[in-house]
Image (tube, rainbow, N blue to C red):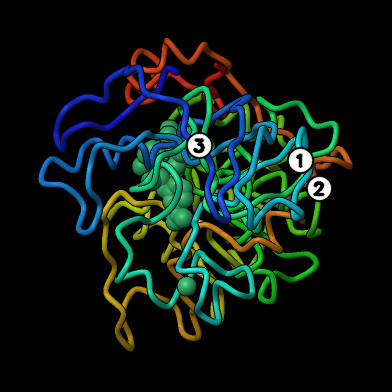
Amino acid sequence: MLAVRLVEWGKPPELCQVPIPEPRGTEVLIRVEAAGLCQSDLHLLDAADGVPRLEPPFTLGHEVVGAVVSTGKESESRVEIGARVVVHGPCGCSQCERCTSGEDNYCDRRHELDWTGIGIGLDGGMAEYMLVPDARHLVEIGALDPAAAAPLADAGLTAYHAVELARQRISADGVVVVIGAGGLGHLAVQVLRATTSARVIAVDVRPQARELALACGATAAVDSSQLTSELDKLSNHKADAVLDFVGSDLTLQAAAGALRSRGELVVVGSAGGSITVTKGGSLPQGTRLSIPFWGSHTELRKVIELASTGNLAAEVDVRPLGDALSALGDLRSGQVNGRLVLVP
Ligand code: NAD
Ligand code: ZN
């Protein structure tokens, strides 16, 4: 079968022919129907010196939808052949308190594992078939379109989890700022619209991304130079929460400046920026700050529910699996609106 693999750190991924794997024990084999492309895939490819614990070669792709083909003995009675599923990607140790409650994204033994998730150390879904380590990582998608559902596995789930973290601090007539209206950000705008009554200001450097944010229900969409004046227009006490899907020095600084007292700063983006946490520094008094990773199994179910009821829909740009390398190039050059999805 065809697979898009990271074969060596610092080298472009390769289109390879590899055998279709066979499921053993708790494993489940799925026939991939769609796999999303994430900015995190580029971070992985750009890690020239490698990422600790992760050993190439492995197949990329951590946003995966497919149909169950076969299972190992121990997963036999736990999933139906033919079931259409989305994969909860941040597979952990399966043993710790976090994993057994479906919070694999915060596995207590992550530092002992040689993977961070499917497509990140473990073989992922940019392929015709994929092994899922255990049936417990699957959520059925019902009648959802596979290409539209694949981005929900990370872009949708991570955005949902970010909103969950901030929810307590979002007031009914408040304002939430979403920085970066790309794959994750455009879904965060929709989650905020569907589950809060706050007004949303989206910030993006690209006009096309700002248009998408408005189409997703943002109250306003601006570039960062207009953020302060837009906030002044909508509120007399700045933002209840800022969700930063970029995470650079510049955006973290903008986020600190946009927050009201006792607000929530959720740093999702991996651009490598930093902000000083100190009393009397740039973060307002009472700021709560989190650096979330992906989301839980329970949250993935809620995301699928939101999509199934028409409240969450990824904007997708669908390409054949064989065009993976040019698709990665387009993502890198900022030519993607919403989410790129590969279809075998
Ligand atoms: P994307 O490329 O689809 O979207 C990023 C958006 O940010 C683009 O629209 C881009 O124009 C915009 N942008 C870039 N610089 C900006 C700036 N200075 N100000 C305003 N907007 C700016 O990327 P994505 O796939 O949505 O991923 C977003 C980030 O989240 C990446 O860093 C990715 O690695 C990270 N991520 C984190 C997690 C997690 O669990 N924490 C999960 C998935 C992705
Ligand atoms: Zn664990």
Mark in the foreground, 1 or 3: 3
Residue, x 60% and y 48% (percent of image)? Answer: 72
Whole-percent x, y for residue 32 in the image = 59, 27
Nearer the N terminus, badge 1 or badge 3? 3
| Residue occupying the far bottom of the picture | 279
Earlier-in-chain disc, 2 versus 1: 2
Q: Can residue 244 be seen in the rendering of this structure?
A: no
| Residue drawn at the location 66% of the way across and 54% of the way down | 75
Name, please, the residue furthest toward the right: 309
Q: CA distance from mark 2 to mark 1?
A: 6 Å
Instruction: Count neighbours of disc 1 (C-alpha within 10 A) and say few if under 14, some if 14 to 19, many if 20 or more.
Output: many
Give the image location of residue 230, x and y in percent: 58, 48
Asked if the residues shown at circle 1 and circle 3 are in contact, with their CB atoms under 8 angstroms apart, the answer is no
Q: How many marks?
A: 3
Q: Are marks 3 and 2 in contact (CB under 8 Å)?
A: no
**Which residue is tagged 1?**
312
Q: Which residue is mark 2?
A: 306
- Residue at (36% x, 12% y) in the render: 326
Residue 298 in sight from this viewpoint: yes
Looking at the image, residue 12 sits to the left or right of residue 95; the answer is: left
State which quadrant residue 255 falls in.
bottom left
Q: Which mark is residue 22?
A: 3
Disc 2 marks which amino acid? Leu
Residue 118 horizontal/vertical position (percent): 45, 46
Question: Considering the numbered disc 3 on the image, is that residue within a helix, a strand or a loop?
Answer: loop
Residue 142 lies, in percent from the top left, at 84, 37
Residue at mark 3 to residue at mark 2: CA–CA distance: 33 Å
The residue furthest front is 73
Graded by Cα atoms within 10 Å as few (under 14), some (14 to 19) or many (20 or more), the crowding at tag 2 reads some
Residue type indicated by callout 3: Glu
Q: Quadrant of the N terminus?
A: top left
